[in-house]
Amino acid sequence: MTDQHETWARTLSKEGKARVTARCEDFIAGVLVPRFLPEIRPTAFNYPIALTGRWRGSRYSFVQRYRSGFSENAGEEFDVGFARLDHATGERFDLMWHRHTGQWLCLHPRLTLAEALRVMETEELVQPRR
């Protein structure tokens, strides 16, 4: 029989989520968009058109929106997550990376929000695709 440990994290309050959302939106607008999507360049393939973020439960996902340039589905849009903050406990988050296989893997556990955003500025794995 294996020994299983469960971790129960206290959920963020509405005010806590609002603070995290505001910081992340500022980070997206002030750091990610100017660096990774200063202008939209349509192509005959899939091309990025926006960088956004959104909550799903206790997880805040950083998302890159694409538009299709292929003739058979031109104009269709879809989202691809590239990084995620999973609320761990208190004011700490696990910084997750989205693998090409669809799996989310924890790169850095238990970071403060400021630490997580700093890592996102420097580590290519948790940055949007160019």
Image: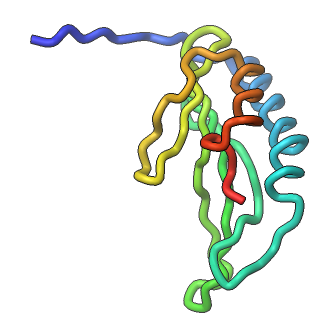
Query: Going 87% across and 44% down the picture, which residue do you hit?
Result: 29
Q: Position of residue 90 (x, y in %)?
A: 63, 8
Please name whichever residue, 18 or 85, is drawn nearer the observer in this view of the structure. 85
Query: Going 88% across and 59% down the picture, which residue do you hit?
Result: 38
Query: Going 70% across and 43% down the picture, which residue do you hit?
Result: 53
Please name whichever residue, 99 or 69, is drawn nearer the observer in this view of the structure. 99
Please determine whether, in this image, residue 70 is positioned above or below residue 109: below
Q: Is residue 42 left or right of residue 61?
A: right
Q: In which quarter of the view is residue 40 placed?
A: bottom right
Q: In which quarter of the view is residue 108 placed?
A: top right
Q: Is residue 4 left or right of residue 39?
A: left
Please determine whether, in this image, residue 105 is positioned above or below residue 100: above
Query: Going 68% across and 60% down the picture, which residue do you hit?
Result: 65
Q: Position of residue 75 (x, y in %)?
A: 68, 80
Q: Position of residue 87 (x, y in %)?
A: 58, 21
Q: Farthest left residue?
A: 1
Number of numbered tags placed on the structure image: 0
Please name whichever residue, 65 or 104, is drawn nearer the observer in this view of the structure. 104
Say which quadrant the N terminus sits in.
top left
Q: Position of residue 125 (x, y in %)?
A: 60, 42
Q: In which quarter of the view is residue 44 placed?
A: bottom right
Please determine whether, in this image, residue 57 is positioned above or below residue 38: above
